Image: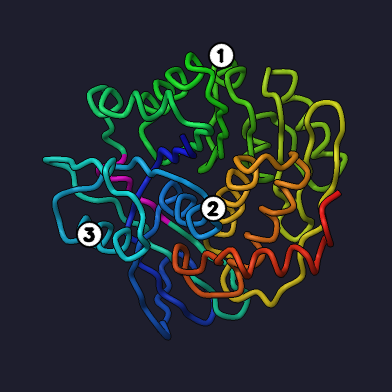
Amino acid sequence: MGIVVFGSFVVDLTSRSAGLPLPGQTLQGSSFKYGAGGKGSNQAVAAHRAGADIILVTKIGKDFFGQVAMDFYQGEGMNTDYILRDEVKETGAALIMVDESSAQNKIVVVSGACGNITAEDIEKCKDLIENASILLLQHEINIDALYKVIEVAYDAGVRIVLNPAPAAPIPDEILKKIDVITPNETEAQTLTGIQINNEEDARRAAKALLDKGVREVIITLGSLGAYVTDGKQDWMIDSVKVDVVDTTGAGDAFNGGLVTALDEGKSLLNAARFANVVGALSVTKKGTARSMPERKQIEQLYQETYGLER
């Protein structure tokens, strides 16, 4: 069985403007688009385009935005057997503002249906989760459902990768069930209390997570790259230099690439390098899901950056 991504779908509503508005300020935008988004969905799309055998579990409403999801997945050729439907809640939405000059963004997410995942929903997916090779999770579903899914996977011996985004505290009894955790600087600080400004800070934060029982840690550091450790060795991976257009979804691209490479048997270091390339390519285009690169692009930039794997 391949990778299972259990997480959120929201429709991204993206505006672009010269700068980002201050409180109370209105800016004239230059463009607006809507399309498939949400951390779970984006990561699943990234893995799918990177060549992974993946199934996405998410929940949508019976509304126009829900149909946006189904149309998108069918167009991508992705499995939709585990796209759950909520009878009451609407499909989630993300309001995204992108600064055209810096490519930075501000985002507000309304979870909608994917914040209403029930015990019955999880039961429907239990066999799928238990037979996964890797389970990839994020923080955009309701927390009780997230912890239950982790419990199911842990009891079945499934390798669990958690992208703890958006930032939120995690109990130690949950952290010790996680095989690989992939916070950014802000998320790592939330989990450890350590502010990260450099490699040494990242090393201390990673050690704090290892001490809590996590087996492997990757802390993404934006333009500084990523800090990677398996508890025995550690590595700093430089960022890949590209022309940045839109950073929205870069972390999702990284995580989708990571699980793809891990599922193919790559070492943690080489999987993180592969993820680094996927994340870099994603920021060279506008949007989130639609900016995820294809396998051929990934392999070309990987070889240019790292050469042949040792």
Three-letter amino acid code at the position of disc 3: Phe
Gap between marks 3 and 2, in whole Å? 21 Å
Residue located at (43% from left, 46% from top): 40
Three-letter amino acid code at the position of disc 1: Glu
Residue that badge 3 annotates: 65
Residue that badge 1 annotates: 173
Q: Helix or strand or loop: what does disc 3 sit on?
A: helix
Determine if residue 41 is in view.
Answer: yes
Circle nearer the N terminus (3, 2): 3
Q: Helix or strand or loop: what does disc 2 sit on?
A: helix
Q: Position of residue 193 (x, y in %)?
A: 70, 30
Mark 3 surroundings within 10 Å by alpha-carbon count, few (fewer than 14), some (14 through 19), many (20 or more): many
Chain part drawn in magenta: 108-114
* Tag shown at residue 202: none
Q: Quadrant of residue 301?
A: bottom right
Q: Helix or strand or loop: what does disc 1 sit on?
A: helix
Circle nearer the N terminus (3, 1): 3
Gap between marks 3 and 1, in whole Å? 36 Å
Residue 32 versus residue 87 in the image, above or below? below
Circle nearer the N terminus (2, 1): 1
Q: Nearer the viewer, residue 43 or 32?
A: 43
Determine if residue 21 is in view.
Answer: no
Residue located at (58% from left, 59% from top): 250
Residue 155 versus residue 78 in the image, above or below? above
Q: Position of residue 32 (x, y in %)?
A: 36, 78
Residue that badge 2 annotates: 252
Residue 1 versus residue 48 in the image, above or below? above
Residue located at (25% from left, 63% from top): 71
Q: Nearer the viewer, residue 185 or 119?
A: 119
Q: Position of residue 244 (x, y in %)?
A: 65, 74
Q: Position of residue 253 (x, y in %)?
A: 56, 56
- Residue 65 inside the magenta-drawn segment: no
